[in-house]
Amino acid sequence: MKFTRQDFCGARNARGYNMDDVVRLTGLHRNTIQRYESGGPTSAETMRKLEALYSEWMDNPETPIETLLADVASYLEDTARYLRSEAWSIDDKLHRVNRLTVEFAKLRDSLGLSCDESTNGQD
């Protein structure tokens, strides 16, 4: 399956994956993936691994972004109930809000099309 660097980056971001996820899924070194995504030269073996991952993404049309949106909406509802509860300490509530902030950062990054690591994969 032929694909461009932009296709790969868009598919990665749409699925909410950061570069570390691609490292885990392909076994490639992080620098190799960065070089590919920035337009640098890549070996045939690297392209074979990236093509296999991209093909898997394209064969599964249901993107995780839909699941992520549903999870964030559910988590928002739970957090609202949690914050209204008097049974939890302020520290517990702050922890919950901080976790929600992380989930929103993941969602924001998933909706972007940039492969720039400064805005992607902030866990």
Image: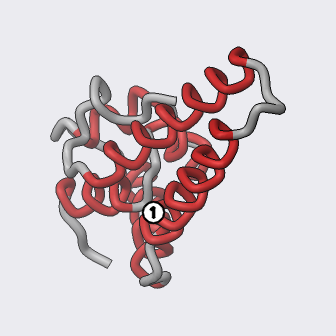
> Which one is nearer the viewer's eye here, 107 or 10?
107
| Corner quadrant of residue 55 | bottom left
Q: Residue furthest right?
A: 87
Q: Residues within 10 Å of mark 1 (few under 14, many from 20)?
A: some
Residue drawn where x is 20% and y is 51% of the image: 113
Residue 16: % across, % down = 43, 53
Q: Residue furthest top?
A: 91
Q: Amino acid at mark 1?
A: Leu
Residue drawn where x is 19% and y is 36% of the image: 38
Residue 98: % across, % down = 55, 26
Establish if 51 lies above or below 117: below
Residue drawn where x is 28% and y is 30% of the image: 119
Residue for badge 1: 69
| Corner quadrant of residue 42 | top left
> Which one is nearer the viewer's eye here, 24 or 106?
106
Residue drawn where x is 23% and y is 32% of the image: 116
Establish if 1 lies above or below 74: below
Q: Is residue 78 left or right of residue 1?
A: right
> Which one is nearer the viewer's eye here, 107 or 96?
96
Residue 78: % across, % down = 65, 52
Q: Is residue 84 left or right of residue 117?
A: right
Classify mark 1: helix, strand or loop.
helix
Quadrant in the picture for the N terminus = bottom left
